[in-house]
């Protein structure tokens, strides 16, 4: 379950009501969760706790889908999908694998996004986008000149700014999904101590380095 409360259909703010209806039809998503893409849908019901945050996020989706964008949708989806994988968000990664198909990325390319650095199915520009995405998400924006020069060789300033904004937007969404346990990121912490067998005494390191 999400870590924050969810807003039922009866209580959603006016601007959020059409979004609820588009995604959930006549159902109350808190009582009957589920979307057409197989997600629980609780990203929407939790974000609706703060109506202007909900509206701001929805406008962000409109931004990257706008006909005014100069960036190739394929490059955008490479960045978004890689951001989800790099940040460790099952939800963002899974959703944008689907969106990647919709803009024409091949199954080979989608399957190679996790290991893009050793894949040969990407163009030099696509590799530059993936490398830049890793700089943004994994290195906190620290970007070597070589990566940026490769990006600039194929993209205008406007396209680079659009890419940077969208990748960072999805880095944020991926992080929030994990923190709030939304959608497919409602998972228990995997990195925990694994108990030793009782017969071992449970203190493996106690004898390490002893000479007697």
Image (spheres, helix red, strand yellow):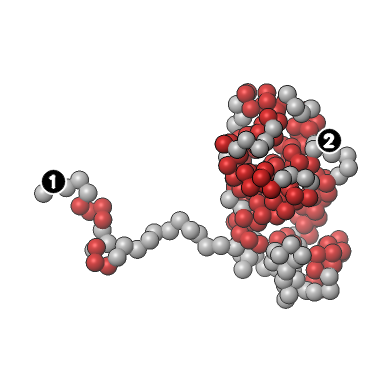
Residue at the image point whose x is 27% and y is 67% from the top: 198
In the rendered image, residue 189, in percent from the top left (x then y), is placed at 50, 59
Percent position of residue 190, x then y: 48, 58
Residue 83 visible in the current orientation: no
- Residue at left 73%, top 24%? 153
Residue 140: quadrant of the picture: top right
Secondary structure beneath disc 2?
A: loop
Residue 71 makes an appearance in the image: yes
Where is mark 2, residue-wise?
Answer: 70
Report whether 42 appears left or right of 9: left
- Location of residue 151 in the rendering, given as x and y in whole percent from the top left corner: 70, 28
Foreground residue among 1 and 84: 84
Of 199 and 206, which appears nearest the observer? 199
Q: Residues within 10 Å of mark 2 (few under 14, many from 20)?
A: some
Q: Residue at the far bottom: name it.
A: 31
Residue visible at 69% across and 32% down in the picture: 123
- Residue on which the image places disc 1: 211
Specify the label residue 188 is tagged with.
Answer: none
Residue 104 higher or lower than 127, as above or below: below
List the single residue furthest toward the right: 67
Q: Which residue is drawn at the image coordinates 76% and 41% (left, top)?
A: 74
The quadrant where residue 54 appears: bottom right
Task: Name the image quarter holding the N terminus.
Answer: bottom right
Element type at marker 1?
A: loop
Query: Within 10 angstroms of label 1, few (less than 14), some, or many (20 or more) residues?
Result: few
Q: How many marks?
A: 2
């Amino acid at each position: 379950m999400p870590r924050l409360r969810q807003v039922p259909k009866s209580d959603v703010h006016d601007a959020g009501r059409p979004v609820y209806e588009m995604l959930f039809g006549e159902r109350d998503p808190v009582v009957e969760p589920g979307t057409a893409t197989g997600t629980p849908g609780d990203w929407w019901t939790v974000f609706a706790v703060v109506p202007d945050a909900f509206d701001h996020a929805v406008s962000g989706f409109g931004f990257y889908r706008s006909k005014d964008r100069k960036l190739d949708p394929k490059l955008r989806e490479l960045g978004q999908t890689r951001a989800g994988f790099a940040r460790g968000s099952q939800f963002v990664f899974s959703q944008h694998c689907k969106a990647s198909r919709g803009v024409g990325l091949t199954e080979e390319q989608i399957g190679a996004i996790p290991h893009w650095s050793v894949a040969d199915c990407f163009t030099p520009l696509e590799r530059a986008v993936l490398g830049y995405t890793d700089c943004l998400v994994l290195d906190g924006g620290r970007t070597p000149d070589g990566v940026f020069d490769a990006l600039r060789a194929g993209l205008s300033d406007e396209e680079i700014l659009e890419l940077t904004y969208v990748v960072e937007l999805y880095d944020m969404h991926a992080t929030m999904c994990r923190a709030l346990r939304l959608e497919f990121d409602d998972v228990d912490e995997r990195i925990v101590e694994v108990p030793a067998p009782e017969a071992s005494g449970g203190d493996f390191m106690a004898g390490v380095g002893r000479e007697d």
